[in-house]
Image (cartoon, coloured by chain):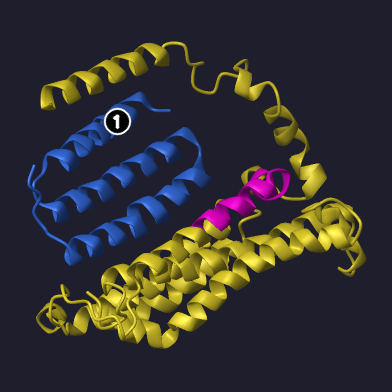
Chain colours: A yellow, B blue
Amino acid sequence: MKVLGFLAVAFTGFLLVVAAEDFPAWGDAASPASTHLSPHFITDAVEETAVPNMVTAVLADYRGFDTMFETAVIFTAGMAVILILRRTRRGRDKHAPEDRTDELVHKDLITRTIVRLLVPFIQLFAIYVVMHGHHSPGGGFQGGVMLGASFILLAITFDLRTALKRIGERKNILLANAGLFIYAGIGALCLVLGLNFLDYSALISILPATDRIMAHSHGMLGIEIGVAIAVMAIMVIIFANLASRGRYDKGL
Amino acid sequence: MIWQLDLIILSLVVICAIAAITVKDLLNASIILGVYSFMMCLLWTEMGAVDVAFTEAAVGAGVSTIFCISAVFQTKRRTKD
């Protein structure tokens, strides 16, 4: 069986290597991928959306529908983790090891002090990444993951209860829903205001002192915030369930 | 693209990938997978795809490593094969 598996892997690898010969060269301007839509994005994205970072413009505006369902996939993943792992007090987990966390939790002064100092800066930087995603690399996903990671860092250094005191289970689920709702809500708002779903030009009638171009930028900021909130909550949910076998006790 | 840097990073990617599947200790494998993600992140940065690199660093090298480690903590640390 092992030999067969190895042969299959080797054969597939050989095919991939052969196929890689047909790829266009790196950065080839004449390749099919960069002749069709990319020139339009590169030359016109700034004029059309007032967003200098064209990756964000493509992700959140031209392909906003795709990104919405990416967020929905992450949301579904979090809900699935809750569904599979979460144990309420009624259903006792017989196979669970008894609380072995005491020996594992090191009450180390240095790490605790460093983390206590570091977490506010991580969160501040995460918010900067979300807010500045139009002008520099970054955006809702990255910022949301970093926000979630700051809570996970807290949960690792202290224990899970300390982190959950800051951002509890109920609040987490609420935030995950709220994030996705902000995204879909902005899309639906555009629909209500008379244009297509997620066509941010429609937002000029409710945003004061903007034109059609800047409305795109503001709409993108709105959905990035929604993505960040949802991703942060889902990251904390997944970690809390994984680290405590869904019992929300001390954790790792 | 500096080809010497590319060569180093790509060979480290391959080494990390092979090490991650051959090592017996699953905790080590998770850490090596994190290193692998970080090397991929360097590769994306080198190719100029900074947004992808940022995501890879935050999700691949950061959070998913933590998820793997917490899963290892709740199951067995050593693998059979």
Q: Nearer the viewer, residue A52 or A74?
A: A74
Above-or-below relation of B51 to A154: above
Q: Residue at x 46, y 33 (%)?
A: B47
Q: Amino acid at mark 1?
A: Leu
- Give residue A237's quadrant in the image: bottom left
Left/right placement of residue A145 relative to residue B35 reads right
The secondary element bearing badge 1 is classed as helix
The residue to which callout 1 is attached is: B10
Whole-percent x and y of residue A186? 75, 63
Q: Residue at x 49, y 17 (%)?
A: A25
The chief SS type of the magenta part is: helix
Indicate whether residue B9 is drawn in magenta.
no
Q: Nearer the viewer, residue A213 or B19?
A: B19
Whole-percent x and y of residue A151? 39, 75
Left/right placement of residue B68 relative to residue A127 reads left
Can residue B77 be seen here? The reply is yes
Q: Residue at x 89, y 70 (%)?
A: A208
- Which residues make up the magenta segment? A57-74
Q: Residue at x 70, y 23 (%)?
A: A36
Q: Work out which quarter of the rendered image holds the C terminus of chain A and state it.
A: bottom left
Whole-percent x and y of residue A144? 51, 64
Dot 1: chain letter: B
